[in-house]
Image (cartoon, coloured by chain):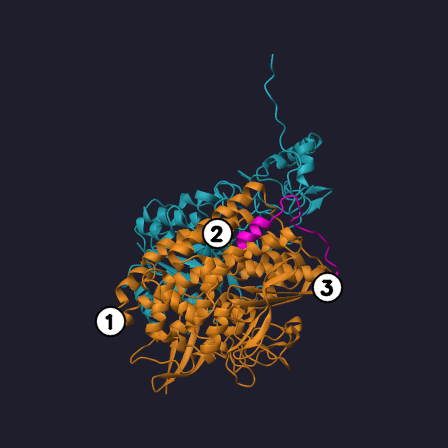
Chain colours: A orange, B cyan
Amino acid sequence: MSRILIGPFNRVEGDLEVSLDIADAQVRSAQVNSPLFRGFEQILQGKPALDALVYTPRICGICSVSQSVASAWALADAMQLTPPPNGERCISLVLANENLADLLTHFYLFFMPDFAREVYSKESWFAPVSQRFKAVQGDASREVLPARAEFLHMMGLLAGKWPHSLSIQPGGTAKPVQAQERLRLLAILAGFRRFLETRLFGADLEFIGALDSEAALRNFADQGDWRSSDLRTFLYLSDQLQLEQLGNGCDRFMSYGSYRIEGVRQFSAGVRSRGGSVQPLDSTLIREDLSHSWMLQGDQPQHPSSGVTEPSLDNPDGYSWCKAPRLGGEVVETGALARQFIDGHPLVEDLVERSGGNVRNRMLARLLELALVVPMMQRWVKEIDLKEAFCHHATLPDVASGVGMMEAARGSLGHWVSVRRGRIENYQVIAPTTWNFSPRDHNGVPGALEQALAGTPVRTGEQEPVAVQHIVRSFDPCMVCTVH
Amino acid sequence: MNLLWLQSAGCGGCTMSLLNAEGPDLITTLESAGIHLLWHPSLSEQTGTEVITLLEALVAGEIALDILCVEGSMLRGPNGTGRFHVMGGTDIPMINWVQQLAARARYTVAVGSCAAYGGISAAGANVTEATGLQYEGEISGGLLGDGYRSEAGERVINVAGCPTHPNWVTEALIELALGEFSAERVDEFGRPRNYADHLVHHGCSRNEFYEYKASAEQPGDQGCMMENMGCLGTQAHADCNIRPWNGEGSCTRGGYACINCTAPEFEEPRRSFTETPKVAGIPVGLPTDMPKAWFVALASLSKAATPERLKKNATSENLIYPPTIHPHKKG
């Protein structure tokens, strides 16, 4: 048995370290460490309640709007406030804008460059893949960065700027849309759609969104050369490297549901295991286990509404600043794959039933969301009624508590706030990667990534096994959210 | 020129904003300025030992480090150990890496208010002992100390902002690459004058409301946000409304107050961010360089003269009265 330590583990958001025990050319067990602690939950204590809208987006520069939305919803819950239809649509548009930009950034800048690594230089496909996806130098980054920046012009119109907007309010949006802005939004979305259809997919978004099985996806792939679109290239590489056999996780998935329009979440909430049906999500069953965290140890794992965050390096079993959230005592995986599996998209259902959560399926679910959500955004823009309200108003009660649960690009994000005399008494955040990259719990059960890494093949002499890199990045971790 | 980018206790948002660089994109901008990216945590291929080997070679002086960019504040806690952020794979606190690398760097650039002054990470009780590279809030010192000078003899350049506008960063880097940087190019808080010699108020699209003190009362209102909504645009050093963000945006255009995020200690306003404190009905915190008596006199005069159009529009989400059209007199 040998042990290797990988870090700094880059092309993820924030700092990450992974420790692997290796025997017989396989990972036997893994420990995931989030090596940065900033203390947002302490920073928020005693602040005027609405100032959470300034602080919480700054937990994360890549999930900034997601943090805003979770915070606004938690405060809205405390204020018993519901945004008007325009407010919901604008919030969903801003959130979708961030989420889709993240999905795109992840695919092109964080995930694909690993196939241009030297370790693959002898492969027949290496030259064109390296030409397109090599980190910094590949052709793709020069196409993607302008497309992403132009797409994020929606933020200029709807949120002032990105990241770190204050337009998202408990009662809706502080940025009413004017007639010419609505037209600009349609033009920006049309431009982004064109990029996705010509470069990423090589097909209409509606065609991709309607793929209903792995067989239909394969049929699509076979209709063109593997170099004719980035999706086809990914599918080809996936077959060559058998990415559907890498990084199999716990196969129990969770989603809080996302994009609330007229009170209805467009992607539904729930819990679902491979081979099972969708179960309702009971958020009262969430607990944060501190047994392997650098945290002051309490008696029992707490629900986040009464959660405590007191950092302490004194825990001899601690190996990460990350807490270990569990749902009804169980590890769950969250993210685009979970979201689409729980919402019942037929392609994702077929993929998961055949091969579970793995590197290929996590990536495909992200790309599928790009195809599904852009048409939804175009519809929401058209539905904005310029004559109606964008924001409702209310005063915060002196004593109140609230919950904001939503889906960031990377999965389920929750904020729990309690307020006394207008100030924050307690504020707890559980981010998507807190779930996915949690350390072990008091039963010694590893977190979702730790489970997914067990059994990973290691090539001779590899210091940073490339398969481990594919698996870790397939979760699209956001480490600054994870610990916050 | 070789550029190394490190991230510590921040949110990564300054990098995410930098990726929004346009006309040309970031990679083209760096390349055409002759800047070679040695390593960036979000963009580069190298991971793990490949990175550590590079950092060790830089510390040993075997590879020239022309520009060191640091994003995120520096965590000295707990108890001065720096272990709230240990760089992955190294068991060495990030503050130690930064100290060693800054000693080698020709120029050291703090990207964002966290790296410059401590920023959001230093808010509240600051349990992590967060500080900026060469400032702790408004006090010169920070991690590297008041006496720190880079190899080129310069203090840390503070591209402050939360986040930074992509152009603030790229222009600072281009200036360095051209060899045109000098100490006169930054203000008293070390911020590049390229953007810090302006006020957010300059070019604010709400300026007509400001002129007549026609004020917004709640989020979504079109009026000026200085009187009630906590806006610090008349005091904040930045050009956000001269060259907007993400195409056509800025905080004030987005419907919310400027929180003066380019300033040290902006993270602790000692009041709510979005409410203007007042004494006898007069906002505390006057526009920069404006004598108080004149401000009060002008404000009451302009308030008395506020046209109906601005008065009504100021507290409305939509335009109620467009400006009146005055046809040429015939005859």
Q: Name which residue type carries label 2.
A: Leu
Residue bearing mark 1: A122
Front in this rendered view, residue A281 or B229: A281
**Residue B15 visible:** yes
Marked residue nearer the N-terminal end (1 or 3): 1
Side of B153 where A174 appears, left or right = right
The chain identifier of the residue carrying mark 3 reads A
Q: In 3D space, how far apart are the residues under numbered discs 1 and 3 (Cα atoms)?
A: 62 Å
- Which numbered dot is residue A152? 2
Query: Of tags 2 and 3, which is closer to the observer?
Result: 2
The x and y percentages for residue A310 are: 59, 73
Residue A441's disc is: none
Numbered mark located on residue A400 in the image: 3
Amino acid under label 3?
Answer: Ala
Q: Is residue A432 highlighted in magenta?
A: no
Q: Which residues are magenta?
A: A377-401
Q: Closer to the N terminus: mark 1 or mark 2?
A: 1
Amino acid identity at mark 1: Lys
- Nearest the viewer among B36 and A134 is A134
- Position of the C terminus of chain B, as image quadrant, is top right
Observer-side mark, 1 or 3, equals: 1
Q: Are marks 2 and 3 in contact (CB under 8 Å)?
A: no
